Amino acid sequence: MIEKHLPHIVCSSPAFHRESDCACAEESSASVRLFSAFQTDLDSDCACVETKSYLSQSILQPQDCACSQILITPNPSIPHILWQLPKTLYLASLAQDYAVAFNPIGHGVIAALDTPTLAQLETFATPGSLTNATAQQLATLGLLTPVPSPAVTSPSHILTAWLHLTEACNLHCTYCYVRQGPRAMDQTLGFAAIDAVFRSAVAQGYQAVKLKYAGGEPTLVWPLIPVLHSYAQDLATRTGLDLRATVLSNGTRLTPPMLDWFAHNNVRLMFSLDGIGAIHDAQRPFADGRGSFAALARNLDLALRAGIKPYLSITVTGQNVEGLADTMRFALEHGLSFHLNFSRAPQDVARIQDPEEQARWIAALRDAFAVTMAYPGRHIDAFLDLMTLSPHNHPCAAGRHYLVVGPTGHISPCQMLLEEPLTDVWADDPLAMIRTENGLFSNPSAETQSDCHDCTWRYICAGGCPLLAREAKSPYCALYRQLLPELLHLEGLRLLQNAGLAA
């Protein structure tokens, strides 16, 4: 029981990267924990990866396991530096005399602060030292920053490669940007592609490689995937690099032997789900026009019974946006993680710039946000396309930490540019070539984009998809600016509700 006269904080764990079907970083779900001024030495018995904060001995635990807390160990020898209130700090009133706090250049933590804690936070409008446990917690959570504030950087220790195994697909999705055709990788070319990815990873000093087996529909060439992955596992062992992998599928062709392979090889599975029933069917029909939802739902049930939880990639279009609330409910009822990807299709990009269409999307997204209040866990990071709450300068890794290998061995900076390759798998260091030639593919820093310069959220969306923002600001900018504060407020209310502090 928390003593109400003590300052205390209700907070979510920091933002970590979720799975996505583009060049975004991965981010896992997050948990919630109640802190008081005297609750600073929480522990966990899991094997989570540790992410260091500003305080050298303060650790925030991410959530790819059953953790239900954040580990905060105050540093007994706080650096002798001054700390300050971030100029970008977002504060808004909540219920029960709490305020929600979020620092867009912090650790991705969302916190609900009671009145005494908020008063302490606001004293740092004038830089000062961390003289008590509450101030140390505020700094540990990223709600205070050192003087001078550190620069926002977006380093990555993972080189991600999309392997476009086949152009063939058994669906004809209405917004698909991949040209369907007969071309497919064979084993020899697949090995050459993996060799090229690992060559670049070693040459550029990465610690890990992530492979995304994709298409078309990759299960149409299923026998190739286990062979390629076994080869990649051997290369990872020889090079000392960590290997991660995901299969991006429409979910209609899974079999029990495939699921057994996923379970035994620690490879993640992503399904594309755009709605429930007829809404999904309208966007993702089979080639003969039949709906594909029934097949996906059947195979999802098969996967869940096999102990595998597919990650859901949800493409939001003008056609399905008003069904999002039901889609969220379906995902959460099945305990599935998800991410929303805003459509890149020309018809949606054109229409979303109409204020009436923006209002329709915003209303539908609000309905979807409200659904998540009934479910534990932090879902805010999944909602706004390329947005992640950990600060970053670039919206995605394309042109920087990302390779897309086509079925003929040509390499592009982004899967939407498969027909515009910049190098191939026979180059000594394909990633170096992509970076050298990326004047053809601009992925500028949020700091250099004139439309983003004065925006509070520029390190959260980083300008949105660089392909859509090549000539002007992102067509989804108005949605980001309108909905992000609302999401933070909703998350603050959920934190209070889960801690038993909301009416």
Image (tube, helix red, strand yellow):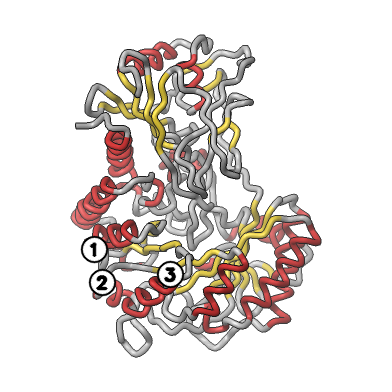
Percent coordinates x, y for residue 259 in the rendering: 52, 74
Which sits in the foreground, 320 or 357? 320
Question: Dot 1, how many residues are within 10 Å of its Cα: few (below 14), some (14-19), or many (20+)?
Answer: some
- Dot placed on the residue nearer the N-terminal end, 1 or 2: 2
Work out whether 381 lies above or below 115.
below
The amino acid marked with disc number 1 is Gly
Percent coordinates x, y for residue 450 in the rendering: 45, 41
**Residue at image location 35% in from the left, 22% down from the top:** 2
Q: Tell me the quadrant of the picture where the C terminus can be found.
A: top left
Work out whether 108 lies above or below 288.
above
- Dot placed on the residue nearer the N-terminal end, 3 or 1: 3
Disc 3 secondary structure class: helix
Q: Tell me the quadrant of the picture where the N terminus can be found.
A: top left
The amino acid marked with disc number 3 is Arg
- The numbered disc on residue 323 is 1
The answer to whether the residue labelled 1 contacts the one labelled 2, judged by CB atoms less than 8 Å apart, is yes
Residue 485 seen in the current view = no
Disc 1 secondary structure class: helix
**Residue at image location 23% in from the left, 31% down from the top:** 502
Work out whether 97 lies above or below 276.
above
Residue matched to label 3? 305
- The numbered disc on residue 279 is 2
